[in-house]
Image (cartoon, grey):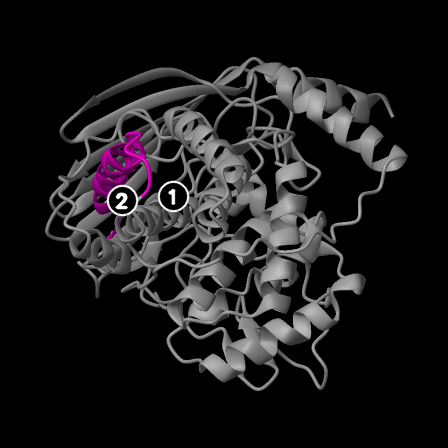
Protein backbone atom coordinates (compact mmCIF):
# COMPACT_ATOMS: atom_id res chain seq x y z
CA UNK A 1 0.00 0.00 0.00
CA UNK A 2 2.79 2.45 0.89
CA UNK A 3 4.58 1.64 -2.37
CA UNK A 4 1.35 2.22 -4.35
CA UNK A 5 0.80 5.56 -2.62
CA UNK A 6 4.37 6.59 -3.37
CA UNK A 7 3.97 5.74 -7.06
CA UNK A 8 0.66 7.59 -7.17
CA UNK A 9 2.10 10.71 -5.53
CA UNK A 10 5.13 10.76 -7.82
CA UNK A 11 2.78 10.46 -10.79
CA UNK A 12 0.17 13.03 -9.76
CA UNK A 13 2.70 15.70 -8.81
CA UNK A 14 3.55 16.14 -12.51
CA UNK A 15 -0.07 16.51 -13.64
CA UNK A 16 -1.67 19.82 -14.53
CA UNK A 17 -4.52 21.26 -12.51
CA UNK A 18 -6.84 21.02 -15.53
CA UNK A 19 -6.28 17.26 -15.73
CA UNK A 20 -7.00 16.72 -12.06
CA UNK A 21 -10.06 19.00 -12.10
CA UNK A 22 -11.65 17.20 -15.04
CA UNK A 23 -10.78 13.76 -13.62
CA UNK A 24 -12.90 14.63 -10.57
CA UNK A 25 -15.54 16.64 -12.45
CA UNK A 26 -16.35 13.93 -14.99
CA UNK A 27 -16.52 11.18 -12.35
CA UNK A 28 -18.84 13.17 -10.09
CA UNK A 29 -21.02 14.43 -12.95
CA UNK A 30 -21.42 10.99 -14.51
CA UNK A 31 -22.51 9.50 -11.19
CA UNK A 32 -25.06 12.21 -10.49
CA UNK A 33 -26.35 12.86 -13.99
CA UNK A 34 -27.00 10.66 -16.99
CA UNK A 35 -27.83 12.35 -20.30
CA UNK A 36 -29.64 10.63 -23.14
CA UNK A 37 -28.42 11.73 -26.55
CA UNK A 38 -31.52 11.63 -28.72
CA UNK A 39 -31.66 15.05 -30.39
CA UNK A 40 -33.03 15.31 -33.94
CA UNK A 41 -30.47 15.84 -36.67
CA UNK A 42 -30.05 19.33 -38.18
CA UNK A 43 -31.35 19.72 -41.72
CA UNK A 44 -28.04 20.80 -43.30
CA UNK A 45 -25.53 17.94 -43.48
CA UNK A 46 -22.97 17.63 -46.24
CA UNK A 47 -19.45 18.45 -47.30
CA UNK A 48 -17.15 17.79 -50.24
CA UNK A 49 -14.53 15.12 -49.65
CA UNK A 50 -11.82 13.28 -51.57
CA UNK A 51 -8.44 12.01 -50.47
CA UNK A 52 -5.42 10.29 -52.00
CA UNK A 53 -4.64 8.43 -48.75
CA UNK A 54 -6.66 5.32 -47.99
CA UNK A 55 -6.12 2.88 -45.14
CA UNK A 56 -4.81 -0.65 -45.40
CA UNK A 57 -7.44 -3.37 -45.62
CA UNK A 58 -8.40 -4.16 -42.02
CA UNK A 59 -11.91 -5.30 -43.02
CA UNK A 60 -11.29 -8.57 -44.80
CA UNK A 61 -14.73 -9.47 -46.12
CA UNK A 62 -18.25 -9.92 -44.78
CA UNK A 63 -17.74 -9.81 -40.96
CA UNK A 64 -14.00 -10.47 -40.75
CA UNK A 65 -11.56 -7.89 -39.36
CA UNK A 66 -7.80 -7.83 -38.84
CA UNK A 67 -6.03 -5.44 -36.48
CA UNK A 68 -2.62 -5.76 -34.80
CA UNK A 69 -2.02 -8.96 -36.83
CA UNK A 70 -5.00 -10.58 -35.09
CA UNK A 71 -7.97 -11.61 -37.20
CA UNK A 72 -11.51 -12.28 -36.02
CA UNK A 73 -14.55 -13.43 -38.00
CA UNK A 74 -18.04 -12.86 -36.60
CA UNK A 75 -21.34 -14.46 -37.46
CA UNK A 76 -22.89 -11.35 -35.94
CA UNK A 77 -20.46 -8.52 -35.20
CA UNK A 78 -19.77 -7.96 -31.51
CA UNK A 79 -18.67 -4.32 -31.37
CA UNK A 80 -17.66 -4.90 -27.72
CA UNK A 81 -15.40 -7.87 -28.56
CA UNK A 82 -12.63 -7.77 -25.94
CA UNK A 83 -10.75 -11.08 -26.19
CA UNK A 84 -7.87 -9.47 -28.12
CA UNK A 85 -7.59 -6.52 -25.74
CA UNK A 86 -8.90 -2.97 -25.64
CA UNK A 87 -6.61 -1.66 -28.37
CA UNK A 88 -8.11 -4.20 -30.82
CA UNK A 89 -11.62 -3.22 -29.73
CA UNK A 90 -10.78 0.45 -30.19
CA UNK A 91 -9.55 -0.20 -33.74
CA UNK A 92 -12.75 -2.09 -34.53
CA UNK A 93 -14.89 0.88 -33.46
CA UNK A 94 -12.76 3.55 -35.19
CA UNK A 95 -14.34 2.47 -38.51
CA UNK A 96 -11.17 3.31 -40.43
CA UNK A 97 -12.06 0.39 -42.71
CA UNK A 98 -14.78 2.58 -44.24
CA UNK A 99 -11.98 4.46 -45.96
CA UNK A 100 -9.75 1.53 -46.81
CA UNK A 101 -8.55 0.58 -50.27
CA UNK A 102 -11.11 -2.13 -50.91
CA UNK A 103 -14.64 -1.65 -49.64
CA UNK A 104 -17.88 -1.00 -51.45
CA UNK A 105 -20.43 1.67 -50.61
CA UNK A 106 -22.95 -1.08 -49.88
CA UNK A 107 -20.65 -2.93 -47.47
CA UNK A 108 -19.77 0.30 -45.68
CA UNK A 109 -23.43 1.15 -45.21
CA UNK A 110 -24.18 -2.36 -43.97
CA UNK A 111 -21.45 -2.10 -41.30
CA UNK A 112 -22.65 1.33 -40.15
CA UNK A 113 -26.26 0.14 -39.95
CA UNK A 114 -25.22 -2.92 -37.93
CA UNK A 115 -23.35 -0.67 -35.51
CA UNK A 116 -26.36 1.66 -35.10
CA UNK A 117 -28.70 -1.30 -34.55
CA UNK A 118 -26.52 -2.36 -31.57
CA UNK A 119 -25.75 1.14 -30.25
CA UNK A 120 -27.58 0.67 -26.92
CA UNK A 121 -25.22 -2.14 -25.93
CA UNK A 122 -21.98 -0.29 -26.82
CA UNK A 123 -19.21 0.16 -24.25
CA UNK A 124 -15.69 1.18 -25.37
CA UNK A 125 -17.11 2.62 -28.59
CA UNK A 126 -18.75 5.47 -26.64
CA UNK A 127 -15.51 6.71 -25.12
CA UNK A 128 -14.38 10.11 -26.49
CA UNK A 129 -11.30 8.84 -28.35
CA UNK A 130 -13.06 6.21 -30.52
CA UNK A 131 -15.98 8.63 -30.86
CA UNK A 132 -13.58 11.17 -32.35
CA UNK A 133 -11.98 8.85 -34.88
CA UNK A 134 -15.27 7.22 -35.83
CA UNK A 135 -16.87 10.62 -36.37
CA UNK A 136 -14.15 11.64 -38.81
CA UNK A 137 -14.29 8.32 -40.66
CA UNK A 138 -18.08 8.34 -40.97
CA UNK A 139 -18.03 11.93 -42.27
CA UNK A 140 -15.35 11.07 -44.86
CA UNK A 141 -17.18 7.93 -46.02
CA UNK A 142 -20.63 9.52 -46.18
CA UNK A 143 -19.35 12.60 -47.99
CA UNK A 144 -17.05 10.76 -50.36
CA UNK A 145 -19.94 8.52 -51.42
CA UNK A 146 -22.61 11.27 -51.51
CA UNK A 147 -24.74 9.45 -48.92
CA UNK A 148 -27.62 11.23 -47.18
CA UNK A 149 -29.22 8.97 -44.58
CA UNK A 150 -31.30 10.44 -41.75
CA UNK A 151 -30.78 7.49 -39.40
CA UNK A 152 -27.00 7.61 -39.80
CA UNK A 153 -26.85 11.40 -39.52
CA UNK A 154 -28.95 11.33 -36.36
CA UNK A 155 -26.65 8.77 -34.74
CA UNK A 156 -23.59 10.72 -35.86
CA UNK A 157 -24.95 14.05 -34.63
CA UNK A 158 -25.71 12.61 -31.19
CA UNK A 159 -22.26 11.06 -31.05
CA UNK A 160 -20.90 14.56 -31.62
CA UNK A 161 -23.13 15.89 -28.85
CA UNK A 162 -21.73 13.21 -26.53
CA UNK A 163 -18.16 14.06 -27.57
CA UNK A 164 -18.77 17.79 -27.04
CA UNK A 165 -19.84 17.04 -23.45
CA UNK A 166 -16.87 14.77 -22.75
CA UNK A 167 -13.80 16.38 -24.33
CA UNK A 168 -10.70 14.75 -22.88
CA UNK A 169 -9.35 17.60 -20.80
CA UNK A 170 -8.64 15.01 -18.10
CA UNK A 171 -6.07 13.37 -20.41
CA UNK A 172 -4.90 16.18 -22.73
CA UNK A 173 -2.20 15.24 -25.28
CA UNK A 174 -3.10 13.44 -28.50
CA UNK A 175 -6.53 12.48 -27.11
CA UNK A 176 -7.71 16.08 -26.76
CA UNK A 177 -6.15 16.98 -30.11
CA UNK A 178 -8.10 14.16 -31.80
CA UNK A 179 -11.25 15.53 -30.15
CA UNK A 180 -10.48 18.90 -31.73
CA UNK A 181 -10.01 17.48 -35.23
CA UNK A 182 -13.27 15.53 -34.86
CA UNK A 183 -15.12 18.69 -33.84
CA UNK A 184 -13.75 20.44 -36.93
CA UNK A 185 -15.04 17.71 -39.25
CA UNK A 186 -18.39 17.68 -37.45
CA UNK A 187 -18.62 21.46 -37.67
CA UNK A 188 -18.18 21.48 -41.43
CA UNK A 189 -20.49 18.50 -41.97
CA UNK A 190 -23.34 19.77 -39.76
CA UNK A 191 -22.67 23.48 -40.41
CA UNK A 192 -22.38 23.90 -36.63
CA UNK A 193 -20.72 27.07 -35.38
CA UNK A 194 -20.34 25.82 -31.78
CA UNK A 195 -18.45 22.73 -32.96
CA UNK A 196 -16.28 24.91 -35.18
CA UNK A 197 -15.28 27.37 -32.46
CA UNK A 198 -14.55 24.57 -30.00
CA UNK A 199 -12.58 22.54 -32.55
CA UNK A 200 -10.48 25.50 -33.71
CA UNK A 201 -9.68 26.53 -30.14
CA UNK A 202 -8.48 23.02 -29.25
CA UNK A 203 -6.50 22.55 -32.46
CA UNK A 204 -4.65 25.85 -32.26
CA UNK A 205 -3.91 25.61 -28.53
CA UNK A 206 -2.84 21.98 -28.62
CA UNK A 207 -0.71 22.12 -31.76
CA UNK A 208 1.16 25.06 -30.25
CA UNK A 209 1.75 22.95 -27.16
CA UNK A 210 2.28 19.54 -28.74
CA UNK A 211 4.49 20.17 -31.78
CA UNK A 212 8.08 20.80 -30.70
CA UNK A 213 10.43 23.22 -32.40
CA UNK A 214 12.14 20.43 -34.35
CA UNK A 215 8.73 19.25 -35.64
CA UNK A 216 8.19 16.21 -33.40
CA UNK A 217 4.93 15.44 -31.65
CA UNK A 218 5.73 15.88 -27.97
CA UNK A 219 4.67 12.38 -26.87
CA UNK A 220 7.74 11.20 -28.82
CA UNK A 221 6.14 8.23 -30.55
CA UNK A 222 6.82 8.25 -34.32
CA UNK A 223 3.58 6.29 -34.77
CA UNK A 224 1.47 8.92 -33.03
CA UNK A 225 3.40 11.57 -34.94
CA UNK A 226 2.22 9.93 -38.17
CA UNK A 227 -1.37 9.72 -36.89
CA UNK A 228 -1.52 13.39 -35.89
CA UNK A 229 0.19 14.45 -39.13
CA UNK A 230 -2.39 12.49 -41.12
CA UNK A 231 -5.16 14.30 -39.24
CA UNK A 232 -3.59 17.70 -40.03
CA UNK A 233 -3.27 16.83 -43.73
CA UNK A 234 -6.92 15.73 -43.79
CA UNK A 235 -7.92 18.99 -42.10
CA UNK A 236 -6.03 21.00 -44.72
CA UNK A 237 -7.89 19.09 -47.43
CA UNK A 238 -11.19 19.62 -45.60
CA UNK A 239 -10.76 23.39 -45.39
CA UNK A 240 -9.59 23.70 -49.00
CA UNK A 241 -12.57 21.74 -50.35
CA UNK A 242 -15.10 23.40 -48.05
CA UNK A 243 -14.31 27.10 -47.76
CA UNK A 244 -15.18 28.63 -44.40
CA UNK A 245 -13.91 31.63 -42.48
CA UNK A 246 -10.64 33.33 -43.26
CA UNK A 247 -9.47 32.96 -39.67
CA UNK A 248 -5.90 31.82 -40.28
CA UNK A 249 -6.55 28.17 -39.40
CA UNK A 250 -5.63 26.82 -42.83
CA UNK A 251 -2.29 28.65 -42.95
CA UNK A 252 -1.56 27.58 -39.38
CA UNK A 253 -2.20 23.92 -40.23
CA UNK A 254 0.01 24.14 -43.33
CA UNK A 255 2.91 25.52 -41.27
CA UNK A 256 2.58 22.75 -38.67
CA UNK A 257 2.25 20.05 -41.33
CA UNK A 258 5.42 21.15 -43.14
CA UNK A 259 7.37 21.18 -39.86
CA UNK A 260 6.11 17.71 -38.96
CA UNK A 261 6.86 16.34 -42.44
CA UNK A 262 10.46 17.55 -42.05
CA UNK A 263 10.86 15.74 -38.74
CA UNK A 264 9.27 12.57 -40.10
CA UNK A 265 11.55 12.57 -43.14
CA UNK A 266 14.58 12.83 -40.86
CA UNK A 267 13.44 10.09 -38.50
CA UNK A 268 12.28 7.60 -41.17
CA UNK A 269 14.74 4.92 -42.27
CA UNK A 270 15.74 4.49 -45.90
CA UNK A 271 13.47 1.46 -46.29
CA UNK A 272 10.45 3.48 -45.09
CA UNK A 273 10.25 2.09 -41.53
CA UNK A 274 9.87 4.33 -38.51
CA UNK A 275 11.62 3.66 -35.21
CA UNK A 276 9.48 1.57 -32.85
CA UNK A 277 10.26 3.81 -29.87
CA UNK A 278 7.76 4.51 -27.08
CA UNK A 279 4.26 3.27 -27.96
CA UNK A 280 4.57 2.23 -31.60
CA UNK A 281 3.55 -0.64 -33.83
CA UNK A 282 3.61 -1.34 -37.55
CA UNK A 283 0.40 -1.10 -39.56
CA UNK A 284 -1.52 1.28 -37.29
CA UNK A 285 -0.71 4.67 -38.83
CA UNK A 286 -0.28 5.60 -42.49
CA UNK A 287 3.31 5.00 -43.61
CA UNK A 288 5.81 7.83 -43.94
CA UNK A 289 5.84 7.43 -47.73
CA UNK A 290 2.05 7.70 -47.86
CA UNK A 291 2.19 10.88 -45.78
CA UNK A 292 4.96 12.36 -47.93
CA UNK A 293 2.83 11.65 -51.02
CA UNK A 294 -0.19 13.27 -49.36
CA UNK A 295 1.89 16.34 -48.49
CA UNK A 296 3.04 16.67 -52.10
CA UNK A 297 -0.55 16.21 -53.32
CA UNK A 298 -1.50 19.20 -51.16
CA UNK A 299 1.42 21.22 -52.55
CA UNK A 300 3.28 21.41 -49.22
CA UNK A 301 7.03 22.02 -49.08
CA UNK A 302 9.42 20.90 -46.37
CA UNK A 303 13.05 20.14 -45.63
CA UNK A 304 14.64 17.64 -43.27
CA UNK A 305 14.63 18.69 -39.62
CA UNK A 306 17.58 19.27 -37.34
CA UNK A 307 16.74 16.90 -34.48
CA UNK A 308 16.97 18.63 -31.13
CA UNK A 309 13.93 19.27 -28.92
CA UNK A 310 12.57 15.74 -29.30
CA UNK A 311 15.77 14.31 -27.77
CA UNK A 312 16.28 11.95 -30.69
CA UNK A 313 19.49 11.97 -32.67
CA UNK A 314 20.24 10.14 -35.91
CA UNK A 315 23.54 9.23 -37.52
CA UNK A 316 23.90 7.70 -40.95
CA UNK A 317 26.46 6.49 -43.46
CA UNK A 318 26.45 4.31 -46.54
CA UNK A 319 26.16 1.26 -44.24
CA UNK A 320 24.43 2.40 -41.07
CA UNK A 321 21.41 4.29 -39.81
CA UNK A 322 21.32 4.71 -36.05
CA UNK A 323 18.50 6.36 -34.12
CA UNK A 324 19.41 7.32 -30.53
CA UNK A 325 17.09 8.39 -27.71
CA UNK A 326 19.04 10.97 -25.71
CA UNK A 327 16.16 13.05 -24.33
CA UNK A 328 13.34 13.04 -21.79
CA UNK A 329 10.82 10.22 -21.95
CA UNK A 330 7.95 12.55 -22.88
CA UNK A 331 5.93 15.52 -21.62
CA UNK A 332 5.97 15.67 -17.82
CA UNK A 333 2.19 15.85 -17.38
CA UNK A 334 1.24 13.14 -19.91
CA UNK A 335 3.83 10.35 -20.23
CA UNK A 336 1.21 7.65 -20.87
CA UNK A 337 2.85 6.51 -24.12
CA UNK A 338 6.39 6.71 -22.73
CA UNK A 339 8.66 3.78 -21.92
CA UNK A 340 11.60 3.33 -19.53
CA UNK A 341 13.94 3.52 -22.50
CA UNK A 342 16.45 6.32 -21.88
CA UNK A 343 19.51 5.85 -24.14
CA UNK A 344 17.70 3.26 -26.21
CA UNK A 345 18.79 3.01 -29.85
CA UNK A 346 17.94 1.24 -33.09
CA UNK A 347 20.44 0.27 -35.78
CA UNK A 348 19.75 -0.47 -39.44
CA UNK A 349 22.48 -1.98 -41.60
CA UNK A 350 22.27 -1.45 -45.36
CA UNK A 351 18.64 -0.48 -45.05
CA UNK A 352 17.62 -3.52 -42.99
CA UNK A 353 16.80 -3.71 -39.26
CA UNK A 354 19.59 -5.12 -37.11
CA UNK A 355 19.21 -3.90 -33.49
CA UNK A 356 15.56 -3.02 -32.90
CA UNK A 357 13.02 -1.97 -30.32
CA UNK A 358 10.43 -4.64 -29.51
CA UNK A 359 7.53 -2.20 -30.08
CA UNK A 360 4.05 -2.25 -28.56
CA UNK A 361 1.45 -4.99 -28.95
CA UNK A 362 -1.10 -4.28 -26.22
CA UNK A 363 -2.67 -1.49 -24.17
CA UNK A 364 -4.00 -3.87 -21.53
CA UNK A 365 -2.86 -3.07 -17.98
CA UNK A 366 -1.13 -6.41 -17.60
CA UNK A 367 2.30 -8.01 -17.32
CA UNK A 368 2.89 -7.91 -21.08
CA UNK A 369 2.24 -4.19 -21.22
CA UNK A 370 4.54 -3.65 -18.24
CA UNK A 371 7.26 -5.74 -19.89
CA UNK A 372 7.04 -3.87 -23.19
CA UNK A 373 7.45 -0.55 -21.37
CA UNK A 374 10.32 -1.82 -19.20
CA UNK A 375 14.00 -1.02 -19.62
CA UNK A 376 14.90 -4.59 -20.54
CA UNK A 377 12.64 -4.44 -23.60
CA UNK A 378 14.85 -1.70 -25.02
CA UNK A 379 18.48 -1.45 -26.07
CA UNK A 380 19.83 0.16 -22.96
CA UNK A 381 21.03 -0.61 -19.41
CA UNK A 382 19.05 -1.79 -16.41
CA UNK A 383 20.63 -1.24 -12.99
CA UNK A 384 20.01 -3.29 -9.85
CA UNK A 385 16.98 -4.92 -11.45
CA UNK A 386 14.95 -1.72 -11.76
CA UNK A 387 13.69 0.35 -14.66
CA UNK A 388 15.31 3.68 -15.45
CA UNK A 389 11.86 5.34 -15.16
CA UNK A 390 9.08 4.00 -12.96
CA UNK A 391 6.49 2.86 -15.50
CA UNK A 392 3.39 1.32 -13.94
CA UNK A 393 -0.35 0.64 -14.38
CA UNK A 394 -0.29 0.60 -18.16
CA UNK A 395 0.00 4.33 -18.83
CA UNK A 396 1.55 5.87 -15.76
CA UNK A 397 5.06 6.95 -14.83
CA UNK A 398 6.24 7.96 -11.34
CA UNK A 399 9.91 9.00 -11.04
CA UNK A 400 11.49 9.63 -14.46
CA UNK A 401 15.02 9.60 -15.79
CA UNK A 402 16.33 13.06 -16.64
CA UNK A 403 19.24 13.93 -18.92
CA UNK A 404 21.96 15.65 -16.92
CA UNK A 405 24.65 15.79 -19.62
CA UNK A 406 24.62 15.81 -23.41
CA UNK A 407 27.60 16.52 -25.67
CA UNK A 408 27.80 15.80 -29.37
CA UNK A 409 29.69 16.40 -32.56
CA UNK A 410 29.35 14.97 -36.05
CA UNK A 411 30.44 11.42 -35.11
CA UNK A 412 30.17 11.21 -31.32
CA UNK A 413 27.34 11.54 -28.81
CA UNK A 414 27.86 11.35 -25.03
CA UNK A 415 25.02 11.66 -22.52
CA UNK A 416 24.22 10.87 -18.87
CA UNK A 417 20.93 10.35 -17.04
CA UNK A 418 19.90 10.18 -13.37
CA UNK A 419 17.23 7.48 -13.56
CA UNK A 420 19.11 5.43 -10.96
CA UNK A 421 19.87 8.29 -8.58
CA UNK A 422 18.12 6.42 -5.75
CA UNK A 423 21.21 4.19 -5.79
CA UNK A 424 23.54 7.12 -6.27
CA UNK A 425 24.21 5.80 -9.79
CA UNK A 426 24.58 7.82 -12.99
CA UNK A 427 24.39 6.03 -16.35
CA UNK A 428 26.60 7.47 -19.07
CA UNK A 429 26.44 6.16 -22.63
CA UNK A 430 28.57 7.21 -25.58
CA UNK A 431 28.12 6.46 -29.28
CA UNK A 432 31.17 6.76 -31.53
CA UNK A 433 30.66 6.23 -35.25
CA UNK A 434 32.99 5.27 -38.05
CA UNK A 435 32.11 4.36 -41.63
CA UNK A 436 31.86 0.60 -40.89
CA UNK A 437 32.03 0.49 -37.10
CA UNK A 438 29.96 1.71 -34.16
CA UNK A 439 31.28 1.79 -30.60
CA UNK A 440 28.69 1.97 -27.81
CA UNK A 441 30.22 2.46 -24.36
CA UNK A 442 28.33 2.38 -21.05
CA UNK A 443 29.66 3.62 -17.73
CA UNK A 444 27.80 3.27 -14.43
CA UNK A 445 29.13 5.73 -11.89
CA UNK A 446 28.27 4.95 -8.27
CA UNK A 447 27.35 1.96 -6.14
CA UNK A 448 26.21 -0.67 -8.62
CA UNK A 449 25.10 -4.13 -7.53
CA UNK A 450 24.18 -5.25 -11.03
CA UNK A 451 24.13 -3.62 -14.43
CA UNK A 452 22.78 -5.40 -17.50
CA UNK A 453 22.89 -4.06 -21.06
CA UNK A 454 20.19 -5.35 -23.40
CA UNK A 455 20.44 -5.56 -27.19
CA UNK A 456 17.50 -6.89 -29.20
CA UNK A 457 18.54 -8.39 -32.52
CA UNK A 458 15.96 -8.48 -35.31
CA UNK A 459 14.74 -12.09 -35.88
CA UNK A 460 15.78 -12.00 -39.55
CA UNK A 461 19.42 -11.45 -38.53
CA UNK A 462 21.07 -14.86 -38.20
CA UNK A 463 24.76 -14.16 -38.76
CA UNK A 464 25.66 -12.24 -35.61
CA UNK A 465 28.90 -13.28 -33.92
CA UNK A 466 29.78 -12.16 -30.37
CA UNK A 467 33.53 -11.81 -29.85
CA UNK A 468 34.31 -10.57 -26.35
CA UNK A 469 32.64 -7.12 -26.33
CA UNK A 470 32.01 -6.91 -30.07
CA UNK A 471 28.96 -7.82 -32.15
CA UNK A 472 29.94 -8.67 -35.70
CA UNK A 473 27.50 -9.15 -38.56
CA UNK A 474 29.70 -10.39 -41.43
CA UNK A 475 26.96 -10.63 -44.06
CA UNK A 476 25.72 -7.09 -43.47
CA UNK A 477 28.92 -5.03 -43.47
Question: How far across and down, in percent of the image, does residue 385 sit?
Answer: 63, 34
Q: Earlier in the sequence, mark 1 or mark 2?
A: 1
Placement of the N terminus among the 4 image quadrants: top right
Please determine whether, in this image, residue 448 is positioned above or below residue 232: above
Residue drawn at 67 percent across, 75 percent down: 114
> What's the residue at 29%, 23% (across, down)?
414
Q: Which quarter shows the C terminus?
A: bottom left
Q: Where is residue 406 in the image (x, y as percent from the top left)?
A: 31, 18
**Residue underneath mark 1:** 225
| Residue 250 lies within the magenta run | yes
- The reply to whether callout 1 and callout 2 are in contact (CB within 8 Å) is yes
In this rendering, is residue 204 above or below 221?
A: above
Q: Magenta part mainly helix, strand or loop?
A: helix
Query: Dot 2 corresponds to which residue?
Result: 264
At mark 2, the secondary structure is helix
Q: Along the horizontal axis of the image, is 442 left or right of 423?
A: left
Residue 71 placement: quadrant: bottom right
Q: What stretch is highlighted in magenta?
A: 244-269
Q: Please identify the residue farthest to the front as the structure is shown.
A: 43
Where residue 223 sits: x, y (%)?
41, 49
Report how far apart the C-alphas of labels 1 and 2 lie in the structure. Answer: 8 Å
Instruction: Classify 10 Å Cα crowding around label 1: few (below 14), some (14-19), many (20 and above).
Output: many
Left or right placement of residue 402 versus residue 387 in this view: left
| Element carrying mark 1 | helix
Amino acid sequence: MIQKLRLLFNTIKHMRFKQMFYQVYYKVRNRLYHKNYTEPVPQTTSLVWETPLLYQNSWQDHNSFKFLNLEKSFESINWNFAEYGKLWTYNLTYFEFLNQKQISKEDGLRLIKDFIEKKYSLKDALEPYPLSLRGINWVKFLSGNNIQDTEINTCLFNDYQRLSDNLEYHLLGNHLLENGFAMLFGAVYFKNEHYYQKGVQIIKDELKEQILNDGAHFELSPMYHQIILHRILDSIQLLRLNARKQDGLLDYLITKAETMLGWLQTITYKNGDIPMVNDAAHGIAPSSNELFAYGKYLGLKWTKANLKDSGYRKWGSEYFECLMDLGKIGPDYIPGHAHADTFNFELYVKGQPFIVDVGTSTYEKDGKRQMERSTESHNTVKVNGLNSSEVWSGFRVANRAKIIELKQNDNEFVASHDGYKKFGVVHQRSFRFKEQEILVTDALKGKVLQGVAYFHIHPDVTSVVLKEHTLECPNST
